Image (tube, rainbow, N blue to C red):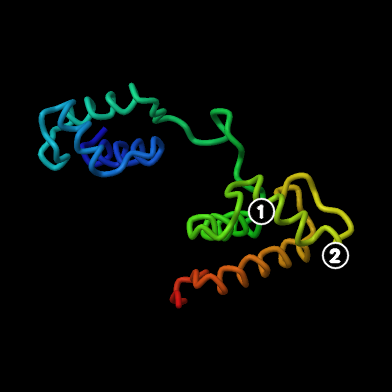
Amino acid sequence: MSARNLQRLVHVGCRQLGIDAELRHDIQLAATGKASMAEMDEAELKLVVGALESRGFKPGFKGASKGGRAPAPRADLRYAHVLWGLLAAKGAVRAPGRDGLNAFVAKRFGKAWGATPIDVDALRDWRQIADLVDALKAWCKREGIPTTQGESSK
């Protein structure tokens, strides 16, 4: 694995473990004696990856293949998850994650649709999915969150 790929792996590990840049530099310094990855060779970068693994980093974790959930089966459903994640990152939702999105769908659309699925990814009616995406986009707009590349937050 190249030095650049190892650097990327270190960043992935830090994201997975919730480690900020300051703590990452401390870990790098403890593992190699160097605080900057730019100064490290491949062997030293592997030591940093090893230090992250000892803290619980699982480099091969790719979601469903290792026991996580598969991504939504449709692109429009995946977009609904992205919008929900944007709202969660802004702090606009009470319950981030899939459970929160499922609760939102049940509360917002339960009466209108007559019934809602247990899991949002079970939706198959394109009109229902469009309703969900439109509602999430409108909420993002109210929160000043851009939902397209050309859009700016206000």
Q: Residue at x 66, y 52 (%)?
A: 101
Q: What SS does tag 2 mark? A: helix
Residue density around tag 2, few if under 14, some if 14–19, many if 20 or more, within 10 Å: few
**CA separation, marks 2 and 1?**
22 Å
Which numbered marker is on residue 142? none
Q: How many marks?
A: 2
Number of the label disc, if any, that sits on residue 74: 1
Would you say 145 lies left or right of 54 here?
right
Q: Position of residue 67 (x, y in %)?
A: 58, 29
Q: Nearer the viewer, residue 1 or 148?
A: 148
Residue placed under numbered mark 2 in the picture: 112
Q: Which residue: 85% across, 64% down?
A: 112
Of badges 2 and 1, the one in the foreground is 2
Task: Give how far across and how far down residue 5 sits, in percent.
Answer: 28, 39
Q: Residues within 10 Å of mark 1 (few under 14, many from 20)?
A: some
What amino acid is found at the position of numbered circle 2 in the picture? Ala
In front of the other: 81 or 43: 81
Q: Position of residue 128 (x, y in %)?
A: 77, 62
The quadrant the N terminus occupies is: top left
Q: Position of residue 36 (x, y in %)?
A: 14, 40
Residue type, mark 1 in image: Arg
